[in-house]
């Protein structure tokens, strides 16, 4: 264990001892991050992890420099961590936390669900409520919910996942075997009420290879992985990789003529590329007829919940299915989807 008392002493010690791991506090440097960070990384062994504890003013620029210069094995902690939390994160990154092996799922791996929409189609409400219902009905199933919505990470805000960011562990995702060795349950936030349910903030500009390794690891450690990708535009390379990798691609569509017609075009576009997608029809009004077409695979239908009802729930951070007077039709539809989901079928609930 070596301590460099100044930024000038650090490169000398690093050159002499070639450390197995390095922790750097950004307050040690007066120069901007784009000057000192590349030089710090260059004097360390290639596979030696570099953990950076930033000041508030430095956190964003350090993350940007790391991404732009594609610096490998660099972990940027949050500036909001307490000393105890910093110790915990460093222990987690360096593998000092005991890695349990009993978390492995079946040999074939779990199911990955990619959830996408054009916007305002109920993905967040679904991800808040459905996994809890699924975890409750099937306590032996392990479930992970990943918020990958870069534009609107509402799940992260609702479940307070800011300290459970998968992007912190990007160096582990560069290599497939390294990704598999990480205990991702210890990285996620475990539900206080459902011990088999986990959440994580995963909104980042992922490279396609990183996404593949991440999902491969989660698939082995969880039975069900729900990925809230959010907007299906623009169609980035990483989004395409997700569509080809997921077991079920669900397009959330509002039950109106414009939404349904747009969904038909989108599904046809991806079908021609060899990707199968299903529609989850949302905001269905009681007694409202809908015609979606026989060639469109329908995953499920959920009824409309009034905006005021949703706003009340979100303001109080209340989960609909756990309230004393939950919307019965919505809960019933989720239960029917869960029943069909475990049987690997599709369901239409009316």
Image (cartoon, rainbow, N blue to C red):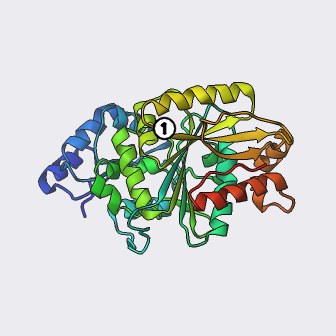
Q: Residue at x 53, y 40 (%)?
A: 277
Q: Is residue 231 visible?
A: yes
Q: Going by the image, does 174 lie left or right of 155?
A: left
Label count reads 1
| Residue indicated by mark 1 | 57
Relative vertical location of residue 311 with respect to residue 222 in this rendering, above or below: above
Front in this rendered view, residue 307 or 57? 307
Q: Residue at x 28, y 48 (%)?
A: 6
Q: Going by the image, does 47 lie left or right of 210?
A: left
Quarter of the view holding residue 183:
bottom left
Give how far across and how far down residue 168 sits, in percent.
42, 49
Q: Is residue 24 visible?
A: no
Give how far across and how far down residue 35 sits, in percent.
29, 32
Front in this rendered view, residue 287 or 321? 287
Quarter of the figure that contains the N terminus: bottom left
Q: Decide: few, some or many residues near mark 1? Use Cα within 10 Å; few <14, some 14-19, many ≥20.
A: few
Q: Going by the image, does 127 lie left or right of 218?
A: right
Q: Residue furthest left?
A: 16
Q: Residue at x 78, y 47 (%)?
A: 315
Q: Secondary structure at mark 1?
A: helix
Give how far across and how far down residue 94 sits, in percent.
33, 62
Give how far across and how far down residue 273 sits, in percent.
42, 31
């Amino acid at each position: 264990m070596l301590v460099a008392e100044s930024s000038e002493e650090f490169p000398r010690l690093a050159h002499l001892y070639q450390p197995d791991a390095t922790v750097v506090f950004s307050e040690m440097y007066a120069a901007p991050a784009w000057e000192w960070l590349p030089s710090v990384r260059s004097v360390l062994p290639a596979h030696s992890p570099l953990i950076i504890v930033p000041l508030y003013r430095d956190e964003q620029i350090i993350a940007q420099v790391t991404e732009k210069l594609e610096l490998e094995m660099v972990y940027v902690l949050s500036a909001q961590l307490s000393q105890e939390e910093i110790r915990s994160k460093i222990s987690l990154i360096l593998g000092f936390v005991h890695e349990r092996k009993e978390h492995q799922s079946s040999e074939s791996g779990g199911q990955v669900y990619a959830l996408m929409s054009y916007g305002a189609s109920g993905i967040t409400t679904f991800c808040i409520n459905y996994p809890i219902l699924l975890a409750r009905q099937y306590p032996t199933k392990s479930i992970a919910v990943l918020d990958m919505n870069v534009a609107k990470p509402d799940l992260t805000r609702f479940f307070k996942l800011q300290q459970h960011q998968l992007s912190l562990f990007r160096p582990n995702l560069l290599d497939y075997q390294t990704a598999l060795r990480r205990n991702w349950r210890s990285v996620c936030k475990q539900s206080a009420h459902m011990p088999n349910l986990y959440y994580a903030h995963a909104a980042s500009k992922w490279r396609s290879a990183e996404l593949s390794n991440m999902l491969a690891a989660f698939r082995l450690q969880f039975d069900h992985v729900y990925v809230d990708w959010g907007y299906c535009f623009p169609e980035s390379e990483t989004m395409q990789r997700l569509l080809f990798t997921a077991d079920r691609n669900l397009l959330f569509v509002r039950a109106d003529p414009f939404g349904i017609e747009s969904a038909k075009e989108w599904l046809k576009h991806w079908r021609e590329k060899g990707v199968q997608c299903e529609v989850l029809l949302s905001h269905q009004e009681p007694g409202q007829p809908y015609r979606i077409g026989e060639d469109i695979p329908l995953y499920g239908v959920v009824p409309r919940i009034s905006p005021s009802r949703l706003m009340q729930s979100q303001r109080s951070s209340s989960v609909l299915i756990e309230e004393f007077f939950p919307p019965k039709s919505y809960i019933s539809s989720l239960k029917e989807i869960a029943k069909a989901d475990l049987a690997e079928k599709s369901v239409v609930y009316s």
